[in-house]
Amino acid sequence: MDGLVEDGIAKLSGFATFTVRSKQARVGRNPKTGVEKAISARKVVVFKASQNMKSIVDAGNKAQLTEDAPLEIDV
């Protein structure tokens, strides 16, 4: 969290990168009532999975599609 606050980025090797992104103020609408409301400018944390994480998840999805056996991955 300190890295995000100070530098705007935090990397967890083999897992993901977290970055801080600024969003501009905008007008939002309640989809149920249609009432418009101002949404203030703010900063949000963005998660980007590492290639290693993506390949593990993808391997799990492929194993699940091909057979019902549990996936075993050595990390």
Image: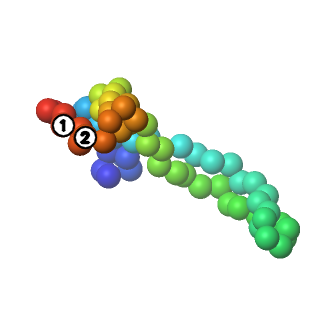
Q: Locate residue 31, reporting x and y percent.
A: 78, 65
Q: Is residue 21 left or right of residue 33?
A: left
Rendered image coloring scheme: rainbow
Q: CA distance from mark 1 to mark 2?
A: 9 Å
Question: For the C terminus, which image quadrant?
Answer: top left
Q: Residue at x 47, y 49 (%)?
A: 45
The residue that mark 1 highlights is 72
Q: Is residue 66 above or below residue 41?
A: above
- Quadrant position of residue 74: top left
- Is residue 17 something that shows in the picture? no
- Is residue 29 something that shows in the picture? yes
Q: Residue at x 53, y 43 (%)?
A: 21
Q: Locate residue 52, reporting x and y percent.
A: 30, 28
Q: Is disc 1 placed on a helix, strand or loop?
A: loop
- Quadrant position of residue 65: top left
Depth order, front residue of 37/74: 74
What amino acid type should be assigned to the residue bearing mark 1? Answer: Glu
The residue that mark 2 highlights is 69
Q: Is residue 3 above or below residue 26?
A: above
Q: Locate residue 16, reporting x and y percent.
A: 34, 37
View extreme (left): residue: 74
Q: Locate residue 62, reporting x and y percent.
A: 37, 31
